[in-house]
Structures are given as structure tokens and as C-alpha cells.
Amino acid sequence: MNKLNVARGMLASKKYIRGLEENIAPIYENTEVKSNDELCDLQEFQDEFVADISNRIGIQKIQKTDEITKKEAYQTLMNSDSRRIRPLLMFLGNLCGSKKTDRKILINCGLSIEMIHKMSLILDDYFDGDLTRRGNPAFHTIYNRQVIIDATNLLLNLSNSTFLNGISDLPINQQENLLELYKKIIFDMGKGFIEDLDRTDKSLDLENAYRINDLQSTTVLQNSLLIGYLLSSRISKKDDTYSGLESIGATIGRTFQGLNDIENFLSEETQVNNKGNLYSDLREHRKNIILSQVPKELFYPPFTNADVIEYIKSNNLIDTTTEELMSGIIIAKKEIVQLSNPIARDTLLFATDKVTEKTLKKIMNNR
């Protein structure tokens, strides 16, 4: 790994992240939604999604929420601590292209992706009943249900308008390619989220667990890389770099979701610190690649959740799953090495080492 390339990439990343931070604080104040014909189908899907979520949260009558409370809530959720790995991946994907991208465009597209992620965190914590996120109070423990709905709607709308504004000066064919990826994020996340909530069977086979994970989580990380690349490339069809980033993004996405699934079954202290309670995926019957390896009959009487936990521990499912994720990262690193842009290649390798692989190794060494 070339340390100079890593230094260049990380310096550029630091400047980019600083730009994101500067723009996050005021973004929630802009509630105007700008749309165009190409996003009509997305807007319709979004409206249905928010209405569905509102019903699930239990709001029968829209109540007026104090504007000061709203403003405080939006500031809280947008400024909460985050690695910002998704917009950072978009930036690294951008480094893989041949054309320089205007910094304002990068900031807008990165903000858009970050807002989608924030929206998903609010809903995930609410429906999973998690009380904390990384040691901080979960959004739903501070603000009422109506604020949750308002925040969800606001973030989706702002994400739309921010993304559209960001790409508005690009050539039409490039805009169309970018919008296709952006809409895929929204559609996939919504579909995966609702499908998981609507499951009636407590058990879920591994193949379908991965499929829902890909819809809910992988799509954001994978398409962040691809959006960044298309911002700095005028390709009309997939080239080798695009295909490589597609594969790398899928592996990184599965690894991050895998880490989240594994966290549900680490030490009780770790679970309480990260989520505020124990075994939330098991308790709420959410898809989880660890749970998907447990025999179906253990999820029903006379067996209890304690029997499921005992099976996971006695069969070393956390260790074997972690090793499988590590194998995926090794494959992804081999694909990263093939990237032609040296700064993007070395910075992606560095990020993969320091973020994903380091976390996996920490779990393996502290089991």
C-alpha cells in the first residue's frame, strides 16, 4: 500500500467530510421539496412508505408538533455522531473516475445519502425497540411519535431535493444514470424494511436473510460507491471499474450489516452499551444472519429465547459467521487492488483495513 496515496486520499476525504459537516447544520431548515418528472414514481413510493410507517407507529390523527421541538429534533439527528462511511464511500468512488467533480456537487450528493441513512436509523431503532445507539439515546426515546413521522418525511424530501440540486447542471444522460442509482437506494430500502416488518414466521432462512439485508443495507453502501464513480465518469454502460466497485460495494455492505447482526449476540455489556437492551433482533423477530442459522423449531414452544441463545453459543455461530465475513473482506481487498486509480485504490484499502477488518478482528479476538 502506497502511504503517499493514502495520505492524499485521506486529506481529500477530510476536506470533503468537513464540507459535509458545514452543510448538515442548516440543511434541516429548508423544507421546500423540489422535484421533477423523473422522480414522480419515487415521490409516489415515498408517500406510500411514509403513510405506511405512520400507521405502524400508531398515529391516527395528525397532531401539531411544536416547531421549536421539531427544530431541536432535526438538529439532534443530523449532528449525531457517525463515521459517515456512506458519503465517504461515495467520495472514494469518485476518486476512481477520470474527471474532476465540482466540490459542491459532491457535498450535495453526500448529504443526500447521509440523510437517507439517518432516516433509516430513526425507524430501525423505533421498531427494534433499541433505547440507545452507540451509547447515545435513540431518537424515539427523546421525541414523540409525530416528530418521528415528521423527521422521516423531512429527511426523505430533503434528500430528494438535495440530490436533484446537486446533479442539476450535469448532462442529461449522466443525470439519468445517477437518478437510477439514487432511486434504487430508496426503493430497495423501503421494500426490505417493510418486508421485514411484515414477516409472520419467526424464523428466516439464511438466503432470505441475506436478501433482505441486501435490500435494506447493502444497497446504500454499494450505490454510494457507484454514484461517486458516475459523478466523475461519463460512461453510458458499465465498464470494468464500475463492475469492480459494484462487487466491492456489495461485499462491504454485507460485512457492515453482518457486524450489526453479530452485535446482537456479543456480551450483554456490549449490547446494552450499543443498543440499550438485549437481543433485540431475537425479541422483535427481525432478520439476522446469526438467527437464520438456528433450526426453525427452536423459535416455537416449548423452546424459548434462552434456548436460541444457547444454541448460538454452543455451535459457535458468531465465530463462524465472523470468519465468513472476513473471507469476504479478503476477496474485496483483492478486487480493490485491481482498481486503476492509485489514490482510490490505496485509500479504499486503508479504509477497509481500519474500519471493517479491524472491527471484525476485534470481535474475533475478544470473543
Image: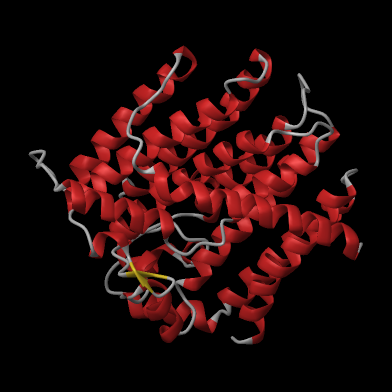
> In this orientation, does residue 333 appear?
no
Q: At 26% from the left edge and 59% from the top edge, which residue is drawn?
A: 140
Q: Is residue 64 left or right of residue 201?
A: left
**Frontmost residue, 146 versus 221:** 146
Position above or below: 364 against 342: below
In what quadrant of the picture does the C terminus appear?
Answer: bottom right
- What is the quadrant of residue 35 in the picture? top left
Q: Which sits in the foreground, 251 or 226?
A: 226
Viewer-proximal residue, 268 or 81?
81
Report whether 237 appears left or right of 342. left
Specify whether residue 94 is in view: yes
Q: How is the image coloured?
A: secondary structure
Give the residue at x 35% y 54%: 75
**Horizontal and vertical percent position of residue 86:** 59, 50
Classify residue 264 by image quadrant: bottom left
- 159 displayed left or right of 90: left
Relative to the observer, which residue lies in front, 294 or 222? 222
Asked if 57 appears above or below 128 in the picture, the reply is above
- Quick check: 33 above or below 333? above
Q: Where does the image place residue 56, in percent across and percent down from the top left?
A: 21, 45
- Quadrant where the image shows the N terminus: bottom right
Q: Position of residue 240 (x, y in %)?
A: 85, 34
Q: Which residue appears at 72% of the width and 40% of the height?
A: 246
Give residue 16's position: percent from left, percent from top.
65, 50
Residue at horizontal 83 percent and vertical 60 percent from the top: 6
